[in-house]
C-alpha cells in the first residue's frame, strides 16, 4: 500500500517536480526488485516520470542533489544487454 501511495504522489505531478519528489523517487527505486505487482508499479511510475519530465529536464534536474541524480539516472536507464 505504501508503494502505491508514493506512486500516486509522483503521478499527481506529471510535469512538475515538487521539493519532496526526488526523495520519493529514490524510495520507490528501492522497490524495483520486489515481487510482482509492486515491481511492475514502480517500473511504470519510473517510465512515466521519464517520459513526462523529459522535455523540461534541464529545469527539473535542478531540484535534485548530485547524489540523487546519480541514483535516479541508474534507475531510469535501461540495463545494457551487451555488458
Image (cartoon, grey):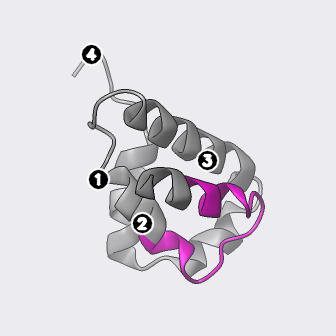
- Left or right: residue 8 compared with residue 39: right
Q: Earlier in the sequence, mark 1 or mark 2?
A: 1
Residue 34 drawn at (x, y percent): 27, 37
> How far apart are the alpha carbons under marks 4 and 1?
24 Å
Q: Earlier in the sequence, mark 2 or mark 4?
A: 2
- Left or right: residue 82 compared with residue 43: left
> How far apart are the alpha carbons under marks 3 and 4?
23 Å
> How far apart are the alpha carbons under marks 3 and 1?
17 Å
Q: Label 1 belongs to which residue?
A: 30
Q: Earlier in the sequence, mark 3 or mark 4?
A: 3
Q: Earlier in the sequence, mark 3 or mark 1?
A: 1
Q: Secondary structure at mark 4?
A: loop
Q: Label 2 belongs to which residue?
A: 69
Q: Residues within 10 Å of mark 3 (few under 14, many from 20)?
A: some
* Region of the chain picked out in magenta, as a range: 7-23
- Locate the C terminus by quadrant: top left
Q: Label 4 belongs to which residue?
A: 82
- Give the residue drawn at x 44%, y 53%: 3
Q: Secondary structure at mark 3?
A: helix
Q: Label 3 belongs to which residue?
A: 50
Q: Is 12 situated above or below 34?
A: below
Amino acid at each position: 500500500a505504501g508503494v502505491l501511495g508514493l506512486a500516486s504522489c509522483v503521478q499527481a505531478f506529471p510535469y512538475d517536480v515538487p521539493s519532496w519528489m526526488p526523495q520519493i523517487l529514490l524510495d520507490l527505486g528501492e522497490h524495483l526488485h520486489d515481487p510482482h505487482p509492486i515491481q511492475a508499479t514502480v517500473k511504470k511510475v519510473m517510465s512515466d516520470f521519464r517520459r513526462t519530465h523529459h522535455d523540461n529536464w534541464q529545469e527539473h534536474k535542478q531540484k535534485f542533489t548530485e547524489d540523487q541524480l546519480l541514483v535516479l539516472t541508474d534507475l531510469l536507464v535501461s540495463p545494457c544487454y551487451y555488458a
